[in-house]
Image (cartoon, rainbow, N blue to C red):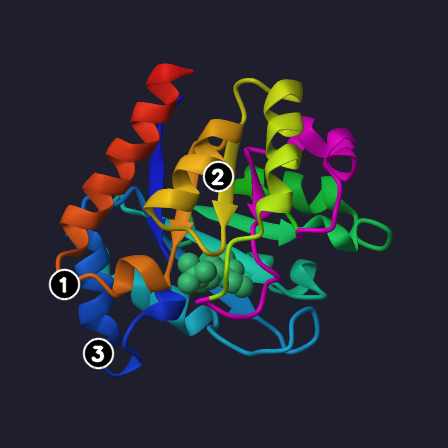
Amino acid sequence: MKISILPSLLSADLGRLGAEIGRVAASGADALHLDVMDGHFVPNLSFSPATAALCRKVLPEGFALNTHLMMTNPEAYAERFAQAGSTTVQFHLELRERLNVRALAAALQARGVRVGLALNPETPAEAAYPFLPCADEVLCMTVHPGYGGQAFIADVLPKIAALRERAPALDIMVDGGINRETAALAARAGANAFVAGSYLFAQADMAAAVADLRAVCAAVWGRA
Ligand code: DX5
Ligand code: ZN
């Protein structure tokens, strides 16, 4: 499996946002992770389509922009984030009772955008099974979404293992509380893509930390 490392812009210094996006671009990371919060799905607010457009403007051509919609109505905004230059749009499966997951996934894929299906810590793997055929990746939250800097929830590990068993070739991403120790735990369970906000942005040398995180995860996969 390809190992991917994604710094989350939520932990950036907002006073120097353009420079921080540039720091990610120069870090050797695989994509920039952009967290979008609506104050309903999660008790916080964060970035907008304008931020996605800024990322696209600052990032070099071809650098992936991974947009994580923590919103009650992703169907109303997904197109705007696609338009702004998102490579992947992720939305949450807790909405599956009222959201037409397959239709939204198909609309994004029709315009060349990858689809990520996100699961909160309590949402079981089984919730994703019917939708795996329309997903390019699954995002397992390893904290309760809404804030950076929270502690990794190890109870999510069996779910990652179940998804990996069910879908051996699927990109499985983890998001929340990721550092070199927790990334190794998630990799051992079967994750191959790793979002890290507070850990990577706290490093004086983000490139070295990205390379180190990648090496830690690759070593686990090499052993598997
Ligand atoms: C949390 C966001 C995460 C957040 C992770 O709701 O989805 O992407 O930035 O931050 P850390 O890595 O600090 O837990
Ligand atoms: Zn996120």
Q: Which residue is mark 3?
A: 16
Q: Which residue is mark 2?
A: 112
Q: Nearer the viewer, mark 3 or mark 1?
A: 1
Residue 54 on the magenta segment: no
**Number of the front mark, 1 or 2:** 1
Q: Which residues are magenta?
A: 120-149
Which residue does the image show at 75% across and 30% down from the upper left? 129
- Picture quarter containing residue 58? bottom left
Assign the N terminus to one quadrant of the image. Answer: top left
Where's residue 144, x and y in %?
A: 62, 61
For the residue labelled by badge 2, is the local secondary structure a helix, a strand or a loop? loop
Looking at the image, which residue is at 13% across and 57% down? 205
Which residue: 41% across, 50% down? 195
Looking at the rendered structure, the secondary structure element under dot 3 is helix
Q: How far is the residue under mark 3 from the one under mark 1?
A: 15 Å
Question: Could you tell me which quadrant the C terminus lies in?
Answer: top left
Q: How would you rate the neighbour count of disc 3 (Cα within 10 Å): few for under 14, some for 14-19, many for 20 or more? A: few
Residue at numbered disc 1: 204
- Within-10-Å neighbours for mark 1: few <14, some 14–19, many 20+: few
Task: Label 1: state its secondary structure.
Answer: loop
Looking at the image, can residue 34 be seen? no
Describe residue 193's horizontal placement relative to residue 163 as left or right.
left
In the image, what residue type sits under mark 1? Ala
